[in-house]
Amino acid sequence: PETQEITEGLAKIKTLGSVFYNPVQEFNRDLSIVVLNTFAKDYKGDSQTVWEAGHKYDDGISILEALSATGLRSIRYAKEVKGVKEIIANDISIKAVEDIERNICDNGVEDLVVASHDDATMLMYKNRKERRFDAIDLDPYGCPSIFLDSAVQTIKEGGLLLVTATDMAVLAGNSPETCYSKYGAISLRMKACHEMALRILLQCIEAHANRYGRYIAPLLSLSADFYVRVFMRVFTSPKKCKQTLSKLSMVHHCTGCGSYVLQPLGVIKTNEKTKQMKYGLPTRGFPNICEHCDHPFHVGGPVWNAPLHSPEFLAKLLTEIPENLATFKRIQGVLSVINEELIDAPLYYTLEQLSGTLHVETPSMGAIRSAILNAGFQVSYTHMNKTSIKTNAPSELLWDVMRAW
Ligand code: SAM
């Protein structure tokens, strides 16, 4: 196979052609560099808050890139993330490891990056007790779920887990059975499928973490091109694991009008006398038929129904995007939209879907937004779909707004 030479960021690498390299993922790598820089700068391992700025991590962070292919990502992390003390670039393929070793030397990062030839799961299991990592990056072909059990154990307390999933067809509802077997949740074929994908992936990682008394705190979640990417911290607290049920919901999606309702798996109850919070199971039944159009629901999930990102972390990220990154503009654009997204309004409607259901003309984004705001509710865009709205308004109101249009 032909040798390919690639320059991306501060790295110049060569690959023999049989080793995986995808130029479209430059955005993914650039964004990960921004996240790691912000994380390494303020990382406070023992803090239980989702994000606390202002802490200087003197020692530098350790990173495991468990599925490294050419080593490009690891080499870029070594050259472009400040405050890194060591990176392991691992791959199961010997050809890939030969590429990684050569690229490490060509880029002069021998003091920071070490190549490793192992099955990623084995490498993580071997290290889960004595040598945990501050950050673990999982960037596999397709589905990451087989790597999660070992990854959630091998990340340090408060460490950063970065996960890509590219099997969007499965996550976005084309194959609900496969989604259940891989991710432990039923996906739905609905307009908000990209956000469903993110919420299914986060639910899956949380389930793996909970088995070891750990839980996740998402810093940033996004859908881009043909994949989803999530960044989260992992903490230990068996007590907090009990709260997971209240962070999960089933999604009821109407087969007629396309409206959706989320039903939490657990509810938080406060004892009036002791003021103690208790996590109980919901007792309310759920209607079988949609009240708006009398059609039955499809039921998917469970999905993560807690915030997809940390507003504090995002605010920090927005001030720290290096202008020399090739995808600077795109990162800035996407992060700005995420920053505006309503955090407590899961999923979204597309305008075409709303107007299609009622057979009315599609209103302008401005018109529908001001109608919702005038009715006293919140509304935002989402980075996942250009013509969509997120809102905390009940669907009755949306239908009224559309009919009045
Ligand atoms: N992270 C890379 C980047 O940003 O350019 C791309 C990684 S590529 C999508 C996936 C890699 O995972 C392939 O090189 C493949 O050989 C490797 N791989 C697949 N299964 C693995 C396993 N069980 N352990 C380690 N590596 C594995």
Image: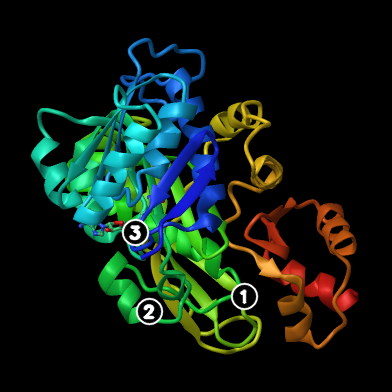
Of 12 and 279, the residue lying toward us: 12
**SS for dot 2:** helix
Q: Gap in Å between the C-alphas at discs 3 and 1?
A: 44 Å
Q: Is residue 163 left or right of residue 81?
A: left
**Above/below status of 191 relative to 322:** below
Vertical position of residue 180 compared to residue 43: above or below: below
Q: Is mark 3 within 8 Å of ligand 1?
A: yes
Q: Amino acid at mark 1?
A: Ser
Residue 166, quarter of picture: bottom left
Q: Earlier in the sequence, mark 3 or mark 1?
A: 3
Q: Position of residue 193 (x, y in %)?
A: 54, 70
Q: Is residue 326 above or below residue 394?
A: above
Helix, strand or loop status at disc 3:
loop
Sequence-wise, which precedes: disc 1 or disc 2? 2
Q: Which residue is mark 2?
A: 176
Q: Quadrant of the C terminus?
A: bottom right
**Residue corresponding to mark 3:** 19
Q: Nearer the viewer, residue 163 or 388?
A: 163
Given this view, does label 3 or label 1 mark the residue nearer the observer?
A: 3
Residue lying at 27% horizontally and 40% vertically, measured from the top left:
101
Q: Residue at x 83, y 56 (%)?
A: 375
- The residue at 71%/43% (across/down) is 329
Q: Which residue is mark 1?
A: 259
Neighbour tally class for label 1: few under 14, some 14-19, many 20 plus, Cα within 10 Å: many
Q: Nearer the viewer, residue 23 or 284?
A: 23
